[in-house]
Amino acid sequence: MLTTLLIPIRLILNFSFAALTTGLIAFVIIVIGLPKLLLPFAPVQRWFSSLANSVFRLWGYAMSLLFRLTQPMRWHIEGDHQLHRDRWYMIIVNHRSWVDIPVLMHLACRYMPMPRFFLKQELIWLPLIGLGCWTLDMPFMKRYSREFLAKNPHLQGKDIATTQQKCEKFRHIPTTVINFCEGTRFTREKHAKKGNEFKHLLMPKAGGTAFTLQTMGKQFDAILDITIVYPPGPRTVVWQFLTGQLREVYVKVETLPITPDLIGDYLQDEAFKQNFQSWLNSRWVAKDKTYDELLQRATARH
């Protein structure tokens, strides 16, 4: 009974802490970003971008603290920890919940450069957060359906140009570029609707990953294949997280080399496109097995 009564208190504390720290840090980042608009000189803009990136790391520490603010938290992290903050990485990761972002921030603020996410265009209108992400040069992507592109062929490849333009800015600051290859969060409804071959994952979309490698592949030091698993529970992971009921998170990190066959023209070279899709699908087959193994461990502990 006492534990149940504490849930609303934990929810208020966690939500308030997350909202206040996110809003404050986003505001500081936006203020730092103003000179980037007023002073169009590349060295000056890079300096302010670097400063904003340092403030962004504070948000990573805040999200890491949030995991244990109102409850004890146990991390089960497997894989390569020989990572460095002054290098460049690309992450391919499954997308189970919005909590995936704090999980990746927890990893990044300790072991790697601060991440950049590919965001939906609509998120730029979020108060403070949208402008803060824009200041940090995060790519905002606008998705078009095949039907829409058929009627508006001049927009074909616009996302590619956006990806390349933003990735060019990452060359000057050590960065971790994150690709949620499934393109959306996993739900049972989406999984059943897609009818794919994976037990725990949605089908991966290769385009964004391929375009990022085409633009920055020679600069990345490695690909980090990360699998995130949460113990099963009666409520959503976000609810468990905010109410202090998420006590464990399982993460596996696998470091992959960037070989020449992973860099090519995904749009124009059909043979490369087929090979890259095959490579990513093989990674997802292995990830599905990894997810199942981690889930069995998490289930056995509960």
Image (cartoon, helix red, strand yellow):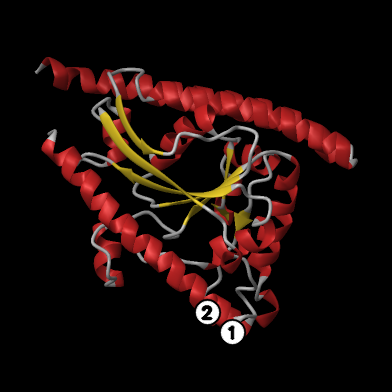
Residue 40 quadrant: top right
Residue 181 visible to the viewer? yes
Please state the horizontal and vertical placement of residue 258, each as a whole percent of the image: 57, 57
State whether residue 191 is above or below residue 233. below
> Residue placed at 41% from the left, 60% from the top?
182
The residue that disc 1 covers is: 150
> Residue placed at 40% from the left, 42% from the top?
100
- Amino acid identity at mark 2: Arg
Left or right relative to 91: residue 128: right
Dot 1: within a 10 Å radius of its alpha carbon, few (fewer than 14), some, or many (20 or more) residues?
Answer: few
The residue that disc 2 covers is: 146
Dot 2: within a 10 Å radius of its alpha carbon, few (fewer than 14), some, or many (20 or more) residues?
Answer: few
Q: Residue furthest left?
A: 1
Residue 234 visible to the viewer? no
Residue 101 quadrant: top left
**Distance of label 2 from label 1 (alpha carbons):** 6 Å
Please state the horizontal and vertical placement of residue 128, each as a whole percent of the image: 61, 35
> Residue placed at 58% from the left, 27% from the top?
57
State whether residue 213 is above or below residue 71. below
> Residue placed at 73% from the left, 57% from the top?
165
Quarter containing the N terminus: top left
Left or right relative to 91: residue 250: left
Left or right relative to 57: residue 34: right
- Amino acid identity at mark 1: Ala
Please state the horizontal and vertical placement of residue 164, each as a whole percent of the image: 70, 60
Task: Look at the numbered discs 2 and 1 and tell me whether their residues touch, using CB distance below 8 Å.
Answer: yes
State whether residue 281 is above or below residue 218. below
Residue sitting nearer the eye, 247 or 244: 247
Kind of element beneath mark 1: helix
